[in-house]
Image (tube, rainbow, N blue to C red):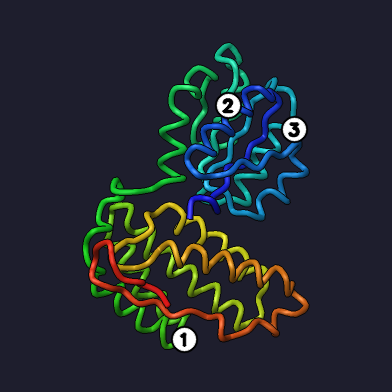
């Protein structure tokens, strides 16, 4: 699944950009380069695992606009800003723009490979994924599989609040997928697209399997659903094939079993 994960890159330094690309590709991901803030919208169609922005002068607006745009449309996706360590004003501007990481170039070189691996190749560090699904989540899945998408919200939300470990992203991702399907039933294109993006981001933060659920398949499925939604557009959302709506099964936690059909 890593081949489907994208790092969105806005950078002026082409040599540095090539180094970033090398790191990402070694981890099985791909870099999507955008040239300005205006073109960032197209890049966000992929729901990136990370967004990386090179800082310019603090008084230059384009890179700051890119950060604001990325924050607006990539809720939950980490944004890394990097630049010369002497550019104090730019670093402050990046922090005000709510970047998750604001690094000098030297720190970026040291720490980016590990951070990229965390998001492109999530694995055993996700605590709780080797445990069985909580009963509340099983209740939510039963409602999901009956097509009661809105009703499964309460059970999954309660499970999410009760869990403090990162495995809770699984519960929220399934919840968001359910709400997206509810929006499709209601012919709410904007709502379905927004929540599908959030579900994709949650699934791509998790390992291929978590608590007996085939997360890799859910990730691919959510992407396919969104691609079909975008193909139809708001004018034809009523034509969305209901046979594409999935069912989710949980197998015993461990390395085997399909988890989703």
**Vertical placement of residue 141 versus 69, above or below:** below
Between marks 1 and 3, how big is the CA–CA gap? 45 Å
- Asked whether, in this view, residue 188 is left or right of residue 120, the answer is right
- Asked whether, in this view, residue 46 is left or right of residue 107, the answer is right
Q: Within 10 Å of the Cα at label 3, are there few (<14), some (14-19), or many (20+) other Cα atoms?
A: some
Residue 55 seen in the current view: yes
Between marks 2 and 1, how big is the CA–CA gap? 46 Å
**Vertical placement of residue 242 versus 118, above or below:** below
Of label 2 and label 1, which has the lower sequence position? 2
Tell me where residue 215 sits by quadrant: bottom left
Of label 2 and label 3, which has the lower sequence position? 2
Q: Position of residue 89 (x, y in %)?
A: 61, 18
The residue pinned by badge 1 equals 147
Report the quarter where the C terminus lies.
bottom left
The residue pinned by badge 2 equals 19
- Asked whether, in this view, residue 171 is left or right of residue 92, the answer is left
Q: Position of residue 42 (x, y in %)?
A: 73, 51
Q: Nearer the viewer, mark 2 or mark 1?
A: 2
Q: Residue at x 23, y 58 (%)?
A: 130
Q: Secondary structure at mark 2?
A: helix
Q: Residue at x 48, y 62 (%)?
A: 219
Q: Secondary structure at mark 1?
A: loop
Q: Secondary structure at mark 3?
A: helix
Between marks 2 and 3, how big is the CA–CA gap? 23 Å
Image marks 2 and 1: residues in contact by CB distance under 8 Å: no
Which numbered tag is attached to residue 62? 3
Q: Nearer the viewer, mark 2 or mark 3?
A: 2
């Amino acid at each position: 699944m890593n081949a489907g994960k994208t790092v969105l890159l806005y950078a002026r330094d082409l040599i540095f950009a090539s180094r970033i690309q090398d790191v990402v590709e070694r981890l099985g991901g791909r870099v999507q380069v955008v040239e300005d803030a205006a073109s960032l919208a197209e890049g966000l169609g992929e729901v990136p695992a990370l967004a990386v922005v090179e800082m310019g002068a603090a008084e230059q607006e384009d890179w700051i606009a890119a950060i604001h745009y990325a924050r607006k449309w990539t809720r939950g996706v980490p944004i890394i800003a990097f630049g010369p360590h002497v550019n104090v004003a730019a670093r402050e501007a990046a922090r005000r723009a709510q970047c998750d990481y604001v690094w000098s170039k030297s720190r970026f070189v040291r720490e980016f490979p590990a951070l990229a691996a965390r998001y492109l190749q999530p694995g055993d560090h996700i605590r709780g994924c080797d445990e069985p699904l909580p009963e509340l989540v099983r209740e939510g899945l039963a409602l999901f599989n009956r097509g009661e998408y809105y009703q499964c919200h309460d059970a999954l939300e309660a499970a999410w609040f009760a869990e403090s470990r990162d495995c809770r992203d699984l519960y929220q991702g399934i919840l968001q997928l359910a709400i997206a399907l509810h929006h499709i039933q209601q012919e709410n294109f904007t709502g379905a697209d927004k929540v599908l993006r959030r579900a994709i981001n949650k699934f791509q933060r998790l390992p291929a399997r978590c608590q007996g659920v085939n997360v890799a398949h859910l990730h691919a499925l959510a992407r396919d659903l969104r691609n079909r939604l975008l193909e139809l557009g708001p004018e034809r959302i009523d034509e969305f094939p209901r046979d594409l709506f999935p069912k989710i099964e949980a197998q015993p936690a461990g390395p085997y079993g399909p988890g989703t059909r």
